[in-house]
Amino acid sequence: MMKFVYEQSVTRADALREMRERWEPAPRSRVVGLSDACGRVTSEEVRALHSLPVKRSSKRDGIAVRSADFAAGAPDTSSWTRDVDFAQADTGDDFPDAFDAVIAVEHIAYDEHGGLHIVEEPPDLQSGSGVNPCGSIVRAGDVLVAAHTRLTPELVASLAVGGHAQVRVLERPRVAFIPTGSELVPFGAYPQRGQNIEANSLLVSGMVRAWGAEVTCYPVVRDDEEALEAALDRALEAADIVLINGGSSRGEEDFNARLLERRGSYFRHGVRAVPGRPVGMALIEGRPVINVPGPVLAAFLSLDWLVRGLVAQFLGVPVPRRRTVRARLSEPVAKPEAFERLVRVSISGDATGEYVCTPLPQPMTLSQTLRSSDGMLTLPIGSTGAQAGEEFSVELLRPLELIEASWEEGEGLR
Ligand SMILES: Nc1nc2c(c(=O)[nH]1)N[C@H]1C(S)=C(S)[C@@H](COP(=O)(O)OP(=O)(O)OC[C@H]3O[C@@H](n4cnc5c(N)ncnc54)[C@H](O)[C@@H]3O)O[C@H]1N2
Ligand code: MOO
């Protein structure tokens, strides 16, 4: 039986660090078309293949002229001939080499005979005035994106501007998710007495995909040690990170933690944080295998602080962070001194426009909790709680505009 032993447990920060120090991921790369590149992470630096404009282009809608004709101020242009003395050159247009400056359309007019007039002398017209020179959009050899950059729509557009149709990106880390527990039935099934709905595969899939991983969810493994080990071996062949869900604590059928201990070159059981305390962490055949606790809220947290950090490590990117707001606690919260406590809160606005956070009342159903969680705050090890009025940095679990919109609808506690 795998008991939680406080002395053998570590803080979340130390647990993540220990795993990251021991794991040497083996990233792979592939080439994708730019249409599929958004959100992917580059595997190498990418430079521009050409310069733009190739030669030059007009900065504004206007006409291209010879700057020399304006050396002594605006000349009489009423008899000038189009494409001989001047040429049309609108924004972005190239124009013949005979010309070297552009006058904006606001500074010219045509009379009823088609004669050109400079109505307002452009100040200080020189060679190159009103002209984007070669390479002013992009220069050949410029760095377009660094290695290990998550591609935004803007950067994908920049790659196209720099001459690319494809880009080499890191393969997404492959996460295998193995739900365990004879009581679990697939979502959509009608639960009989003693059964529970397998929901964490959906939670995990959504979370790890958002961080840039791909996920394969295995069918539920019943409480049977051999069946579990067979599933683990299958997953280790195909995945970079394996998540075994459930059976992390003390029950008779909690084989999972024991299996990790037996097979792991490294093994840790338990972190000093609630919820999510009985998480198990191992390195098996050089890969992280995490025994994620079964209850949905505990599973969420193990994914959140541990698996998120591992996915980021594989991709060589900083660990993505949630947006936070500063908010005052509306009521005191107690906690065990030896553990961090992660507190789900609702967020409201007070009369002065400041944010106020309120711990979700207990007891509360899981569905109410998931619907009412606007944010989450962390109370550190060593404190016995927090007082009303204390200010915290609250991680947002849903977008602030949705939280604020729910106040306007006067929903109160959802
Ligand atoms: N006597 C003790 N009991 C428990 C302790 C303890 O210290 N002493 N620790 C508690 C804590 S804290 C947690 S967290 C849980 C950990 O549970 P397990 O990881 O062992 O998970 P199971 O026992 O297999 O299941 C618990 C619960 O979660 C449901 N579950 C499991 N997988 C899924 C899934 N994929 N989708 C949805 N729900 C799932 C499962 O049906 C059970 O209801 O242990 C406490 N107990
Ligand atoms: O560690 Mo557990 O149920 O408190 O998540």
Image (spheres, rainbow, N blue to C red):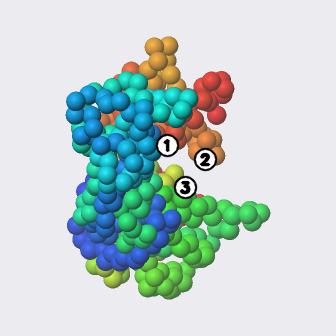
Residue 191 found in image quarter: bottom right
Residue 213, image x, y percentages: 45, 66
Sequence order check: which comes first, mark 2 or mark 3?
A: 3
> Which residue carries the number 1 mark?
397
State whether residue 54 appears in this view. Answer: yes
Who's the residue at 75% across and 65% down the image?
189
Contact check, label 2 and label 3, Cβ < 8 Å? yes
Amino acid type, callout 3: Val
Contact check, label 1 and label 2, Cβ < 8 Å? no
> Which residue carries the number 3 mark?
296
- For the residue labelled by badge 1, is the local secondary structure a helix, a strand or a loop? loop
Q: Among all residues in the image, which is located at the extreme top?
A: 351
Amino acid type, callout 1: Leu
Label 3, ligand 1: CB separation under 8 Å: yes
Who is closer to the viewer here, 86 or 225?
Answer: 86
- For the residue labelled by badge 2, is the local secondary structure a helix, a strand or a loop? helix
**Label 1 environment density (alpha carbons within 10 Å; few <14, some 14–19, many ≥20):** some
> Which residue carries the number 2 mark?
366
Residue 385, image x, y percentages: 36, 33
Tell me how far mark 1 sits from mark 2, CA to CA. 15 Å
Residue 392 found in image quarter: top left
Tell me how far mark 2 sits from mark 3, CA to CA. 8 Å
Residue 152 drawn above or below residue 81: below
Residue 144, image x, y percentages: 31, 59
**Label 2 environment density (alpha carbons within 10 Å; few <14, some 14–19, many ≥20):** few
- In front: label 1 or label 3: 1
Q: Which mark is residue 9?
A: none
- For the residue labelled by badge 3, is the local secondary structure a helix, a strand or a loop? helix
Image quadrant holding the C terminus, namely top right
